[in-house]
Image (tube, rainbow, N blue to C red):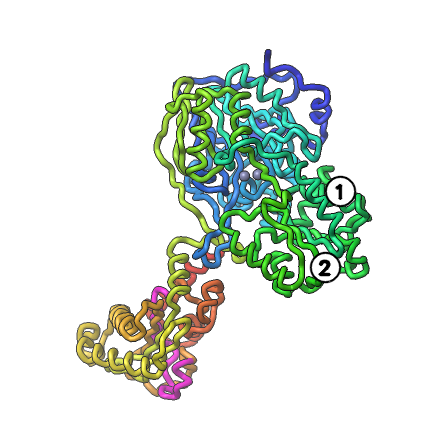
Amino acid sequence: MTLDRTPKPAIAKSDANSDRKIVTRGGAKSIVKAGEPRTIVKRDTSDALKIIPLGGLHEIGKNTCVFEYGDEIMLLDAGLAFPTDGMHGVNIVLPDMTYLRENQHKIQGMVITHGHEDHIGGIAFHLKQIDIPVMYGPRLALALLEGKLQEAGVADRTELRRVGPRDFIRIGTHFLVEFIRNTHSMADSFTVAIHTPVGIVIHTGDFKFDHTPVDGETFDIQRLAEYGEKGVQCLISDSTNSELSGFTPSERAVFPNLEKIYMQAQGRLIITTFASSVHRVNMILELAEKYGKSVAVLGRSMLNVIAHARNLGYIKCKDETMVPINAVNRIPDNKLVILTTGSQGEPMSALTRISNQEHRQIKIREGDTVVFSANPIPGNTISVVNTIDRLMMQGAKVVYGREAGIHVSGHGCQEDQKLMIALTKPKFFLPVHGEHRMLVKHSQTAQSMGIPAENMIIIDNGDTIELRENSISKGDKVPSGIELMDTSRSGIVDDRVLKERQHLAGDGVVTVAATVGWDGKLMTRPEVHIRGVVTTLPTETLQLKLQAGMEVLLRDRWSEFARPIKDGGQVDVDWAGLQYQIERDVQRVLRREVQSSPLVVFLLQSPATPGTMGGDSVKSASDGIQSTGVIPKVRAAARVVPSFEAVNAVNSLNTVNAVNEVNTVNTVNTVNAVEAVNAVSSTVAGGATTPIVKRATRQRVTARARVNE
Ligand SMILES: [Zn+2]
Ligand SMILES: [Zn+2]
């Protein structure tokens, strides 16, 4: 038996697909045509193949795996995860890409197994930072990816190459990859066999064994068995359902239960499922046609997936079955299906908005049946049950939960996992795609089938697995944290920003502005604003206490910060030092008075040069101070020393909501003051803007640049 035989006739037809061109860039990356040698360069076999998962372990999400041999890297998938509570203003979570940034020159290309977000969702973001010359993937995944890349403006940063079942592609000189059709909740999904200098590595991708797939494309288990016969060095396998016994039922098992609901529904049917569950959507449409119902689709991701899947033939329905959402009122209730996103209770999704009575076109009414054809992902349970409650309170009948039999997983259970091991008969085994206990359980299943415990490793993100012909071991760890993205502003939310956001959300913020003259006296009562702080203390009392504290400090320690300049009778003041000292004092007073530790933004102002009080009339650098009327004619180049927090984090601080809006520049006079100073400083003779102001301005620019990069 040989792996080099020409594909079966049915598959040869797909090979003729004209849109799969030979990629010539770099000379070595191509789809290997029938008849070409399917071998790879076997160099020094003492070298190890490094397998480095950057995400997807001890979690479900952001699957990203590096295969490295010599000076070549091949990537497999690059997904995203969603934020947990406390990640304020973060929309998505990506793996730490430091290792790839540092080894960018080695990257030869990427292999994509299927189009789920936890496998392709990170790609657009990575392309902004690293070059990936070419990506090979299934047609449906690439159709979805293409849109994302265009939206992110990085479509020209890589070449997307579509592959079909049993296609071989070459990446660099050390990787030859065969795509093997598998079955999963998403259509057009693959397991891959990677031929490397140390042997064949099979990565299952996400899979279950579905012998009656909705689209008729069965798992190519013949090919897997062939590899098992020839010898598989290492199996890297999906662990999602390793805690569950038995086989995962076929997607088709859902059909009769859904059909029962179609038959019983008296009024409108509102069905929600994952947008990416192409097979499920297909059945929902099939049933609609069978029962003479029209279907309106709600939700951008649902519309997007359906459009691409129809285009590629994975969803089959007549044009007239689909109706636009603004036409639903013309259709009798018992002839209408509304297919919508929101199965996970996502706050902005159509179904959640319907349940909140905030949706423009759809209002729930008596007689509606709402169907949750998806189980909540752990972590989403509360939002899902809250949505169900609200829908019921408005009179809908809601069908949900496991007993309803309207959802099956796309991932195999223990018996599926055993079948995978039995077919491939691997020497070494790496469980992936799962939380720690799932990986452990999966490894126990493998041991029960005779793979010795020392031939498998429970790995974590960032571990380097070194695979040789006769051994598997752990090498050095690479950076493996997370990168948090605020996609509304396409920037990385680093640890410091996140901590500040948590601080704001937990304790609120207090801003204090004070003006000190060259004589070391407060020129006006400090201005205090409190947002999101729980306290019964009136602002005025706080103002008086802060004022008293500052007066004592200035009286006792002014001489430490002000030094006379020779001859001129003037003083040189260390404003930055004074700012720091007063800020510490303010923090201490606040901690004592409000019994919590709010984020403190302290702004110290002073006139530009000694003896200029009451000079030329130029607008004050601070509107706040001007409004007091105490110092109407402060020279424009007033020194403004915004605190660290003010500049870097808190550009907009309107109560706790500010946490999610941190970058909108305004309110707190801090930033205005800096801007005002910049604006007017150029007009002031002698360029009196001090180095302190310049430094503060630079800080602000840096903070912004970081958010916008
Ligand atoms: Zn998947
Ligand atoms: Zn997955």
Residue 612 place in picture, x, y as percent: 32, 83
Residue 288 place in picture, x, y as percent: 77, 46
The range drawn in magenta is 624-645
The residue under the point 42% across, 18% down is: 469
Q: Farthest top residue?
A: 1
Report ligand 2 position as a quadrant. Answer: top right
Q: Is residue 270 left or right of residue 249?
A: right
Q: Which residue is mark 2?
A: 367
User: Badge 1: how crowded within 10 Å, few (<14), some, or many (20+)?
Assistant: many
Residue 114 place in picture, x, y as percent: 59, 36
User: Mark 2: which secondary structure?
Assistant: loop
Is 312 or 41 nearer to us in this picture?
312
The residue under the point 27% across, 73% down is: 592
Give amino acid for label 1. Glu
Q: Which residue is mark 1?
A: 286
Q: Is residue 328 left or right of residue 56?
A: right
